[in-house]
Amino acid sequence: MSTAPSSMRGFASSIRSGNERVIHLLRRNLRLRAAAIIFLVGGLAGLCAALVSIPIVMSTERALMQRQSEALIDAVEDAVSTACFVDDRELAKQALAGLVKNPYLRGAEIRVDGRVIAAAGEARTAASVLSRAVHSPFSKSQVVCEIRVEPNETYTRERVYTSALRIAGLLAAQTAAVVLAALLAVGYFVTQPIRSISMSLHRIEAGAGGQIPMPRGHDADELGMLVRDTNHLISGFSGLIASERALRAQRERDEQRMRLIFENAETGLFTLADDGRLQSWNPACVSVLGGPLVGAAAPTLAQLLPSLAPALNALQQRCIERQRSVSEDFALREHDGQERWIQIVLTPASGGELQGLANDITDRKRAEEAAQELATTDSLTGAMNRLGLNRRLANMVAEHARDSARGFSLAMIDLDWFKQVNDTWGHEAGDHVLRVVAQRLERAVRRTDTVARLGGDEFVLLLDGVSEARAALTILEKVRDAVLAPIPLEGGAQARVGASIGVAVVSGAVHSPDELMRRADAAMYAGKKDGRNNTRVFSDTA
């Protein structure tokens, strides 16, 4: 019992496997696929033609059978007329016997007054019977009997089916011929050229610029157009590939060059991710910012420089909001107490990233400070010059305007008897005296105070935080005593100069720098009028 189901399953599996192989073959072979389609269409057309031809042939055969029956009746009508007239039944039977020998007739009978007097062939039915009245041989108006014949429908159908089979066979042969012709035509004009084109395509190397040879006889048809278009595409793609290779090589060279620049640049280069952490950085960045170290987790700038965290966060936020480059200089205090300056430039990039530059600008800052100092320092004495004094005085006035409790005093000093020094010992001795006086002034005041030389023998002192006249006079008395001390000259000589000092004390109302200078100058000349080497405080009533 178990053998039969197993055999059936094996048979079904074989059928499925065979169907899959046929389908696979049809999918891979254009010629077979075209032949199968033509065969299927031709077979269906032949079957339809055969089915349509059956009723046509049947009608034709029936008409032929009708004509044949009529002709046979015509042939025996005279004999039957004589047999009926003389009532010779034997003659009638002989006539019918010759009649039914024809395959188109199944049976025949002769009737007289409704009675069958003679019959031949198989039993007759009422269906499809042909009958004719037979007249007397001597009078056409006298009916002597009736002859009836039954067509042979079986014979007719056999002839119809034979004709239909013959037509079907011819159509099958025609279909086979068409399929064979189609196979040859498709193979020669389609699949073989396509195979040749495909093999030529496989032999072409990418970027080599090869061309597909034109199949013979297909210059002007669709395959020729396909080959020309394909060759045009190959040429275009070959050019694109060559261009892409050149661009790739150029990009690799540019990347290598940029990598060398990135790695060896003295400027720190870095990239910040959208969360503010460093994504990439070069060795110079480590040198300028002090990190990050190799293998360490990527920090933010604020984590790398915690003392500058608020300013760095503000710089990043400003760059993101403005969507343009921003920069700022920062001062760093090293572990040894030295001050170092760095400049950080941030530029927005795609994806929320920021690109950054970090430069150590300590040398530039020092150079700027040196240039600033040189621009504001008197070259002879080393004290502050007029430009430096104006800047310092303007700052102190602005600070006093913001905080009236923070006053100061401005003292104008003019050296007495300095002209005699120049006249007696010369200008070199005069320059020496000016340098010594400047040094004594520096020592007589605090480090927070300012000593400036306006030119010639005029000096100015800015006493920061001294907002009372008495305190100012106490300091200036020390200054005047320091200036009065003898100044040794070359050759053992000594020079002596005095100091006429005018003071303007800033403690309440805010005055402009020019007004303060005018007041101090007025107080100084008032002291000179009183005999020189005096100290006077400016008074509105003076």
Image (tube, rainbow, N blue to C red):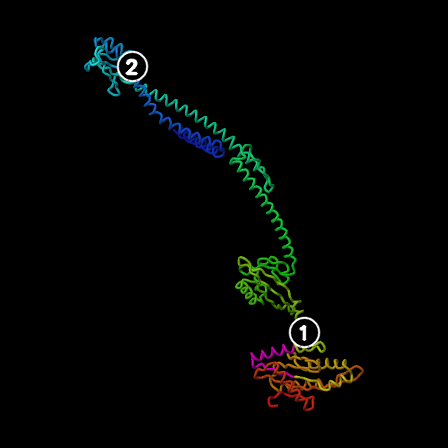
Q: Indicate whether residue 488 is drawn in magenta.
A: no
Which of the two residues, 347 or 215, is positioned nearer the viewer here?
A: 215
Q: Indicate whether residue 393 is drawn in magenta.
A: yes
Crowd tier of the residue under label 1, counting other residues whose Cα lies within 10 Å: few below 14, some 14–19, many 20 or above? some
Which of the two residues, 400 or 360, is positioned nearer the viewer here?
A: 400
Comparing labels 2 and 1, the label whose residue is closer to the camera: 2
Quadrant including the C terminus: bottom right
Q: What residue type is labelled 1?
A: Ala
Reading the image, the residue beneath label 1 is 375
Q: Is residue 162 above or below residue 285?
A: above
Disc 2 element? helix
The disc, 2 or 1, on the residue closer to the chain's N-terminal end is 2
Residue 355: x and y in percent read: 58, 60
Q: Which residue is drawn at 60% across and 47% down?
A: 243
Quadrant including the N terminus: top left
Disc 1 element? helix
Crowd tier of the residue under label 2, counting other residues whose Cα lies within 10 Å: few below 14, some 14–19, many 20 or above? some
Which of the two residues, 249 or 264, is positioned nearer the viewer here?
A: 249
Give the residue at the far right of this rendering: 491
Residue 115: x and y in percent read: 20, 14
Give the residue at the far bottom of this rendering: 530
Q: Is residue 174 above or below residue 501?
A: above
The label on residue 61 is none
Residue 393: x and y in percent read: 62, 79
What's drawn in magenta, residue-wise? 388-411
Q: In this view, does 104 lie to the left or right of 288?
A: left
Give the quadrant of residue 175: top left
The label on residue 72 is 2
